[in-house]
Amino acid sequence: MSPPSPAPVPWLLLLLLIAAAAVASAQTIPMTLDVNEIPQRYDEAQLWRIYNISEAMQRQVPVSQVLEQKFGGNIWKENSKFLDISIAKEQLKAARSFLNAQRLDAQVLSDNVQAMIDEEHMNGINATRADLGHRTKKATRSSMHWKDYHDLETIYAFMREIRSKFPNIVRLYTIGQTAEGRDLKVLRISENPREYKKIWIDGGIHAREWISPATVTFILYQLMSNWENQPAHIRGLTWYIMPVMNPDGYEYTRTTNRLWRKNRSPTRRSSCVGVDLNRNFDIGWSGYGSSTNPCSDTYRGSAPASEAETKVVTEFLAKRKYNLEAYLTYHSYGQMIVYPWAYKAVKVRDASVLQRVGNTAVQRISQKTGSTYEAAVTHEVLGIAGGGSDDWSRAALGVKYVYTVELRDRGAYGFVLPPKYIKDTALEGWTVAETVAQAIG
C-alpha cells in the first residue's frame, strides 16, 4: 500500500518556508547591526559661527564644551575669535536658547550640512565623468587626479606607481599598521639620502580634512612629474611624504561619517571610539586644549604616543633626525601658515626667521591663486593646544622649519570643500613646500 500523498502546501506558506531557510543559511549576516557602521547623516543640521565666546569663558561658561556634550554639537573650528560648530536639527531650538541665555548669537554658515556633503560628492562625480569624456590619457596610471577626492587604495596605488617609475631614487616604507590593520605608508625621494637635508610632509592626521591628503598627493605629483627639471633646492633634498597619517579615520569618513576627526582605536572603559592623533604626541600632552573624555573629538588618548599611528611616526623620525630641517603638516581649514609653539603662549627663539619664510609663502600664494593666507605663531591665532605633531618635531627632534598649514577655506564650506577647489588649494600647499625647500637650501 503506497503512502498517502502529502497535502498541498499553500503558496504563501511555501514562500515563508523558503525565506526562513534562506535566513537560517545566511551565516554571514550579523544578528545585531553595529550603530557605528550606519552611515551618519546631517539632514538640516546647521553650521554656526559664534563670536565672543571668550567673554562667556570669563564667566566660567565653556560654550564649546556645553554645545558638544549637552547638545551633541560637532566642533569644526575653535580659536580666540570664533567657534564653528554644527548642531543637529533636533537640538537647534535648545542650543539657541542656551546661546541666548549667554547673550551670544550664532551666524548660520549653512542651514543644511548634509546638502553640503551631497554637493561635494556630486561635484566630484560630475567633474570626473566630464574629464573621462574628453581626456585622451589618464593623468596617472593609478587613476589619481585632482578633480575629486580619492579613497586610500587609490592614494597608495599612486605611491606604488611613483616608486615603480623612479626605483633608483624612491623608496616606499610601510612603517606600521593601524588598529584596524591598515598599512601606514611613507615615500622617500632622494638622490643622496645619506647626505642631503631632509624635509617631512604629512597629511590626513584628522580624518575629515580631505583637502589635506589631496594636497599632499599633489605635492608628490608636482615633485615627480618634473623631477629632472626641478631646481637644485628641490632635487638637493631628501623628501619624506606621508599623505594619510590616519587611514582608519579617513576610510571611515568615506563610508560612514563624513565629519569624523579621530582615529578608530577602541577605548577601554568607554564605548566611544578614537583618539585625536594631533593631541597624542609627547609635548604638553596633559595640558590645555585636549580632552580626557574618550567621547570628545579632542580626546588625547590614555598616554602620550598611545596610538599606533603616533608611535610609528615618532619612532621613524627619531631614527632620521640627523639633517631633518623641515616638518610640514597639512590641515584644514582657515588659510593659515603657523609655527610653534602651540602648547604654550611663547614663541620659539627663531620665530622671526619662521615668520619671514611664512610671509614669503603668503605673498607667493597671493600671486599664484589670489588667496589670502596669514602667517603667525600658532597659539596666537588658533589658541593653546598640547600634544601636536608640529610642537613635538621642534622639541624632540630640533627641526628648524616647522609649519602647520591650514588650507582652504575660511568657513563657507569648512571641511566639506567642493572638489572644484582642490587644484588651486593644492597649488597653495605646494607653494608652501617650495618656499620652505628654498629656505633650507
Image: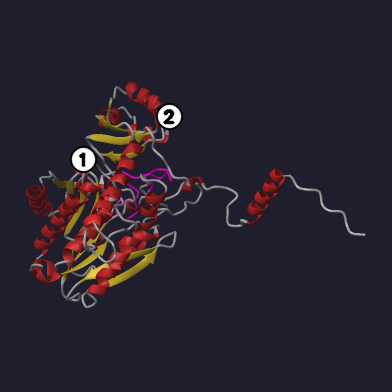
Q: Residue 74: x percent and y percent?
A: 36, 38
Out of 292 and 168, give the one closest to the viewer: 168
Q: Residue 136: x percent and y percent?
A: 21, 62
Res. 132 in view: yes
Please state the extent of the stretch shown in magenta in the rendering. Answer: 280-299
Task: Name the residue carrying label 1.
Answer: 410
Q: Residue 116: x percent and y percent?
A: 31, 39
Q: Residue at x 35, y 25 (%)?
A: 96
Quadrant of the rendered structure where residue 142 is? Answer: bottom left
Is 435 inside the magenta-drawn segment? no
Res. 318 in view: no
Within 10 Å of the Cα at label 1, are there few (<14), some (14-19), or many (20+) other Cα atoms?
some
Q: Is residue 75 above or below residue 389?
A: above
Is 281 inside the magenta-drawn segment? yes
**Quadrant position of the N terminus in the picture:** bottom right
What secondary structure prevails in the magenta region?
loop
| Kind of residue sitting beneath label 2 | Glu
